[in-house]
Image (cartoon, rainbow, N blue to C red):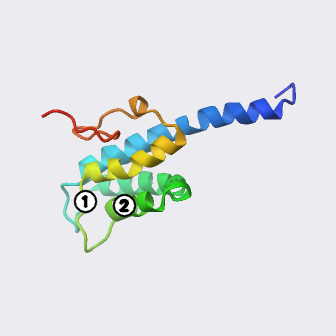
Amino acid sequence: LEALDCINLRRTVAQVEHLLLVPLIQSVLKYAVKNQNYESNSDNKHLAIGKAFALSLLPFLAAKNPDATQAVERNMILSPTLQPVFDGSQAVADAILPVMQDLGVNCDLVGIQEGIQPCGERPQS
């Protein structure tokens, strides 16, 4: 910054920007797993927490992949008529994967969440 080197600053920001999404992605996946077993009329706090993390991630998804946005909305945003995580937690991970790849988010940084694999490979059971 002191050198007023804006070009290199932009490059540096672009290189680390995707890292800021890792905790959001991890949290959405964590709550997708937790919330898939609740009923549509449940008042469990995990549903609200999952929704909050999903709402934080949706603008990044919307900028890159409308289909991913719709899948995460359908599964993580509460609806009185649909069971939470209606399509399953792996479907949420599968929807996020192309956006992760497009943003340069390394799958190893996101990791595996309780039986789902954000990079599309199903864990051995």
Residue 26: x and y in percent read 39, 40
Residue nearest the observer in this picture, 74 or 44:
74
Q: Nearer the viewer, residue 21 or 106?
A: 106
Q: Residues within 10 Å of mark 2 (few under 14, many from 20)?
A: many
Image coords of residue 94 (percent x, y): 33, 49
Q: Are marks 1 and 2 in contact (CB under 8 Å)?
A: yes
Say which quarter of the image contains residue 20: top right
Can you tell which quarter of the image residue 2 is in?
Answer: top right
| Residue 125 x/y as whole percent | 12, 34
Picture residue at 48% right of the left edge, 52% below the top? 57
Question: Which disc number belongs to residue 71?
Answer: 2
Query: Residue at point 27% right, 50% down?
Result: 89
In the image, residue 5 sits, relative to residue 61, either above or below, namely: above
Q: How many marks?
A: 2
The residue at 25%/48% (across/down) is 34
Mark 1 packing: few (<14 Cα in 10 Å), some, or many (20+)?
some
Q: Secondary structure at mark 2?
A: helix
Specify the farthest residue to the top: 3
Instruction: Please tell me the numbered disc located at residue 87.
Output: 1
| Residue found at the far bottom of this picture | 81
**Which quarter of the picture shows residue 59?**
bottom right
Quadrant of the image for the N terminus?
top right
- CA gap, disc 1 and disc 2: 8 Å
In the image, is residue 45 above or below residue 18?
A: below
For this rendering, which residue is in front, 101 or 5?
101
Residue 10 horizontal side relative to residue 51, left or right: right
Q: Residue at x 45, y 38 (%)?
A: 23
Q: State the SS at label 1.
A: loop
The residue lying furthest to the left in this view is 125
| Amino acid bearing label 2 | Ala
Marks 1 and 2, the one that precedes in the sequence: 2
x and y, in percent, of residue 15 in the image: 62, 32
